[in-house]
Image (cartoon, rainbow, N blue to C red):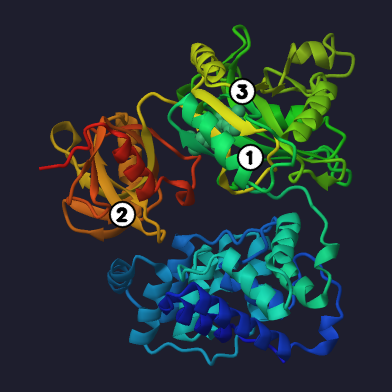
Amino acid sequence: MTTHFTSVAELAERMARTASRLKKRAEIAEAISAVRADVDPISIEKPIEMGHPGDVGLFCLYLAGLPFAEADARKLSAGGALLTKALLAVSGASDAELTAAYRRHGDIGAAGFDLYTAHAVAGDGTLALSDVAEAFAGMATAKTTAIRAALVEGLLRRATPLEAKYLLKLMLGDMRIGVKQSLVEEAIAVAAGVAVAAVRHAVMLEADLGAAAERAFAGTLGDARMRLFHPLGFMLASPVDTPEEAIARFTKEISTEDTEVSQGDTGVQAFLEDKYDGMRAQIHCGARDQHGRVAIYSRNREDITESYPELVEAFSAVEEELIFDGEILGWDFAAGLALPFAVLGQRIGRKRVGDEWRQKIPVIFMAFDLMFAGGELILPLPLRERRNRLEAVVETLVDRTRAPLLEPRQPKAQGSMFDTEEYVGERLPRLMISPSRLVQSAEEIERAYADARARANEGVMLKAAGSAYQPGRRGLAWVKLKRELATLDVVITGAEYGHGKRAGLLSDYTFAVRNAAGELENVGKAYSGVTDAEISELTEFLKAHTLQDQGHFRTVEPLVILEVAFNNVMRSDRHASGFALRFPRIVRIRTDKPLAEIDTVERVEEIYQSQVDKPVES
Ligand code: AMP
């Protein structure tokens, strides 16, 4: 039997209305079991192949809002513009109707539902999951936008209003039904009667939720093998305010409560490194079957490879499969120091990096961890062992991973007077290793912190020597100490027009942090710290991502993350969080940080409690 897309759409609609996580999980598990029960027994025998999941795999992927598995390099390339055009063509609605519907919901999918209903457009509900997969495959390889648009229209013409709603959301990659991939993983485990850790492990190795679902039922989760070229989660650090607090954290919590710290650790055993202010990145290289391929991923799991051609040239010489964790830094080769973030920032996000940028802002990769080596993920090894492996690997690679300042060019003609080396100039080292040493006392940390600041780095990081690498977690095994003024990472939720020379520009930003339920709660408003150029860019961006236009003020999609500094935190009923910031100013726009990682109301409360005077806004 075929599974129809209706089953995804109906379940998604129910999920959007269900608050309880447990209920959601049970319903998803039941739905997955029903899909499985319908699958033709012959197709169950098929080997599991990436890019060709069966109905169970497709069902799970689509419910999680993924048109393709994460490891699948294919992209739909269907943005809002293409989708709204197709929606207008199929529904027969006018631009004005679409705009009104979009304003109501702030979501193309939900707007689509209204337009289908208003114009009595309805497919017959026969759209199979495999039809959707086939259209998606066609979109990924379509040579022109017209071909892609025709495929979208073809799907939409067959869709019921509810299917159209979720097809549109799926194509945009955001279902907004409160079902994260981790919940689908749990439901797969329940449905197939396997351990959720086994499902998660397979997903981490293969980055293919659909394949993991198929494997869970086939009993082959254990056959999943790590593939390079999909980002693994990054381990993050918790903030501490003083060296004493860092020491206390390691002594109390890590050595007694963290089961991943190996037995035999006594007292404080922590590695100390500088905290660099660059761009966190993961480098995959050395694949045996894809010679010379290098991929660089950001903390947002974005593929940022093309922005750093020097690193690609350098790491393409690696002949052993490796995944490094580290920081991309703008580098002053003469001084042997990192350039300030503001300098590197000018290069971040650039797609075409030619000689001008290579010369103006040279980059290096400062490695601080090794995640994959010798054919296996070494995340469970204690840091001190990973560090030994990292040191050994870097030693063999420093010379091989050099790349010239300028773009290498082939000699112009045979017998040219330049050979390639001379032509491109000196080859600079591009792989460095973050100096690290064991520390035991607050005084040592204090001194190291001062030294790090003297090198113009942000502060120091402390990492429990016995700790495993926990991907995607902000645990206690890593802490960061950057005293200065506290800053918060927040997201813009609203914007207001400025005055005077900023009239006509959205220059005042209302921003939010996350509460314990994961919802956004406003905590302040800032209008200083950004440059005029940034304000113009933000104005354009926020206009394009407005949810509600109230004239002077607009609520906007939570897409822009800011780091804000402030003098202190006050209790206040001006904002939903119950707090307000005094003299907030924007330190920078954090394009490197995903929404999921902004600060929390709890953190705001912590800062509030740490203040001696605990002010209340009158
Ligand atoms: P934050 O962005 O303030 O949450 O701090 C976490 C970030 O510190 C990571 O994402 C890294 O980009 C950065 N970082 C800088 N130096 C290090 C280091 N030596 N070890 C780990 N993370 C570091």
Label located before the other in sequence (3 or 1): 1
Which residue matches tag 3? 440
- Disc 2 residue lies near ligand 1 with CB under 8 A: no
What is the quadrant of the C terminus in the image? Answer: top left
- Tell me where residue 526 appears, x and y as whole percent: 25, 38
| Residue 353 visible in the picture | no
Q: Residue at x 82, y 17 (%)?
A: 420
Looking at the picture, which amino acid does disc 1 mark? Ser
Which residue matches tag 1? 255
- Tell me where residue 267 appears, x and y as whole percent: 64, 30
Instruction: Indicate which quadrant contains ligand 1.
Output: top right
SS at badge 2:
strand
Q: Residue at x 70, y 55 (%)?
A: 73
Q: Residue at x 64, y 84 (%)?
A: 128
Mark 1, other Cα within 10 Å: few <14 / some 14–19 / many ≥20: many
Looking at the picture, which amino acid does disc 3 mark? Gln
Q: CA–CA distance between discs 1 and 2? A: 35 Å
Label located before the other in sequence (1 or 2): 1
Label located before the other in sequence (2 or 3): 3
Examine the rendered structure and indicate whether residue 549 appears above or below residue 563.
below
Looking at the picture, which amino acid does disc 2 mark? Glu
**In the rendered view, does 539 fall on the left or right side of 553?**
right
467, 458: nearer the viewer? 467
- Nearest to the eye among marks 2 and 3: give it: 3
Q: CA–CA distance between discs 2 and 3? A: 39 Å
**In the rendered view, does 34 fall on the left or right side of 227?**
left
Q: Tell me the number on the disc at residue 609.
A: none
Q: Tell me the number on the disc at residue 521.
A: 2
Q: CA–CA distance between discs 3 and 1? A: 13 Å
Q: Marks 1 and 2: CB-CB under 8 Å?
A: no
Q: Residue at x 75, y 22 (%)?
A: 409
Mark 2, other Cα within 10 Å: few <14 / some 14–19 / many ≥20: many
